[in-house]
Image: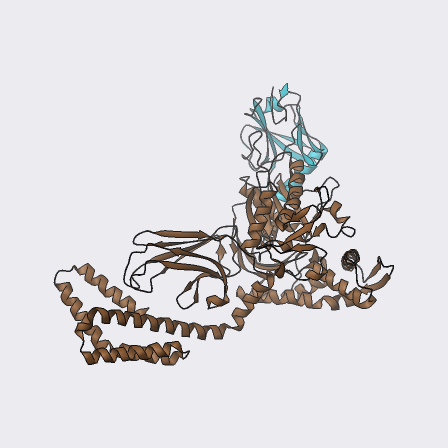
Amino acid sequence: MALFQIAEPGESAAPHEHKLAVGIDLGTTNSLVATVRSGLAMVLADEHGRPLLPSIVRYLPDGTTEVGYAAERHQARDPHNTVVSVKRFMGRGLRDIAHIEAMPYDFVDTPGMLKLKTCAGVKSPVEISAEILKSLRLRAEAALGGELVGAVITVPAYFDDAQRQATKDAARLAGLNVLRLINEPTAAAVAYGLDNAAEGTYAVYDLGGGTFDISILRLTRGIFEVLATGGDSALGGDDFDHRVFCWTLEQARPQPLSPNDARLLMAKAREAKEYLTTHAEAPMTAQLSTGEVIDLKLDVDTFAGITQTLIAKTLQAVKKTLRDAGLKPEDIKGVVMVGGATRMPQVQQAVGELFGQQPLTNLDPDKVVALGAATQANLLAGNRASGDDWLLLDVIPLSLGLETMGGLAEKVIPRNATIPVARAQEFTTFKDGQTAMAIHVVQGERELVEHCRSLARFELRGIPPMVAGAARIRVTFQIDADGLLSVSAREQTTGVEANITVKPSYGLSDDEVTGMLKDSLAHAKDDAQRRALKEAQVEAQRLIEATSAALAQDAHLLSATEIAQIQAAIGKLQTTLLGDNRVQINRAMDELGRGTQEFAQRRMDQNINRALSGRTLEELDALGKMENRGEKS
Amino acid sequence: MAVILTEKAAQHVANYLTKRGKGIGLRLGVRTSGCSGMAYKLEFVDEIGEDDTIFESNGVKVVVDAKSLPYLDGMELDYAREGLNEGFKFNNPNVKDQCGCGESFTV
């Protein structure tokens, strides 16, 4: 017998055509699946009524797997084959991972993404995540009584292309159709914004198990816009556990730990942390396999002391992100708390102090992301709910651009631009008769390409031979709603085209992303000077090319002495441009410019004479423009 | 003539209406479609039509249009759980036969 849900007026689905869609919060520590039932987003619990699925996968020798609580029970006994926090490995290489020495896994460093050796064979993080997603899919199908048309999966705002793609791959492997990936804080805002219909500028502080995200969002009537995002993709509740773990070792000084004992103490550390949310003191007791007994007491003040720097780190990221958005703490109307770690009273207090207001915690911080994802999934699947005419805007974390002459990075899409987005910019050829152009796509905030991250390279061929600067090549950068980039280049007169979709090769590590942002600030002045020097060098080189070309063509307009003078000036410029003195280069350019004024005048007269003898006015006009462009660029 | 909600069903409807933030009540209806001829309609109500009949059951307004009423008269709407799945269930004495899943029926 069918069970029905209530539809919006006039929106009843035909029999057997209900579009079942879910939102999935694929978390570092716990994962959830939610759906919209009778217009209300709700988390789907398992057969024991538990909403969370621990993001833990255990591989058994017979090739089968255990996921969630079943796997969690064995994590202390079978740490090699029980994978926790696999999200930290998504799209990452071995060298990107912090605290690797504390992990009980046999890592295999393969190109692109690391893998883990288990008793059931070598597994990639994509395969392991797929097990978690499959478990959630089966739960949802049982709860909704049918196959899913699709899912919205959330990812941290800081996830780069490689990590997003890995998440999509895992979903496909789990038999899920991905409707869209959305940022976790954005999903949280969806859940809060729709439930409370609140307008204004909000901050979403998301301290999950393994990631910290801060997003500044503007909610105006019907529109969600992410103004800025920041954070640290290697900071979360796990790190607080790790601090307690380290504190325990310092206090008790046990023998070197076996992997099992390390796992046991980590679990105890987490228990103590959670206990301190509602108590002033937590017991920290454990019996190790060596027979040693640890019996400590951790009080709130000590805990606050050892975790102070972690909270301070999050607050720094908050301040930086506010600056990015051009806002002050007092501009924020409300602060949304997301992630289980925000239950810690000292986190709520520190955030409250920074913003001068009590943060919002009225939705369960563990569920809020999944609920928002479910709302979005319901919409994307074509099931309208009351009042959803809203549009979701998201942003890119790092600028995207391409390499121009002299190794300079030209930004095409600036960081924090809202996506989906398409931006086009025109470029031209540097040399006469140039028929191909290399396009090097880079990501980062620095002025020089060597300091940015290289994403892709491709070539546009078949440009018709023209004078330098005459070709018009339109390069379009397009980022889809999932944050994936495609770049195309098109020569405007002939229509020859080349394009590339950036296939993520290797993920940026957390340190790299934060490092790149920090560098851009630290080196801003330096970079500006270097950019000016490079620009001067490129300009000087172009002037030499142009003058030499003119000499080769129209030497008959000059006397031998004049030619010698010009060539001397060229020679001088050539020597100075090898150095790094921008002032000298500019002076030498001015000299060459003055030395060729008379020559330019004579060439102009000659061209006009030619034009009068049988050229159209349009051609004359075009000629003038070309010269003009040459002088300017 | 009557259409009633069980207490459980009424509670769920009231809860959904509160969360939704607007709506007068619950519309029950039938339309011709589906593998067995007729299909149920279960929707929130924002506007009452001219040919609508309104019942009140366990504190919830139930709205049925004139064309649907003969097919639904005397029925009870329940809220049930089946395994992990849960939702509203039509207990309709007018139904002679239904498709395997019960989403559509004949009278």
Chain B image colour: cyan
Q: In the image, is A313 to the left or to the right of A391?
A: right
Query: Is any atom of residue A41 visible in this view?
Result: no
Q: Which chain is brown?
A: A
A104 and A399: which one is in front?
A104
- Please tell me which residue is depicted at 23% across the width and 79% down the height of the picture: A564
A522 and A3: which one is in front?
A522
Q: In the image, is B36 to the left or to the right of A305?
A: left
Asked which quadrant contains residue A88, the reply is bottom right
Q: Is residue B68 above or below residue A32?
A: above
- Please tell me which residue is depicted at 44% across the width and 52% down the height of the picture: A500
Q: In the image, is A301 to the left or to the right of B70?
A: right
Q: In the image, is A593 to the left or to the right of A153?
A: left
Image quadrant where one finds the N terminus of chain A: top right
Asked which quadrant contains residue A509, the reply is bottom right
Query: Is any atom of residue A139 visible in this view?
Result: yes
Q: Position of residue A610 (x, y in %)?
A: 14, 65
Q: Position of residue A90 (x, y in %)?
A: 61, 53
Q: Position of residue A456 (x, y in %)?
A: 47, 57
- Please tell me which residue is depicted at 45% across the width and 61% down the height of the picture: A401
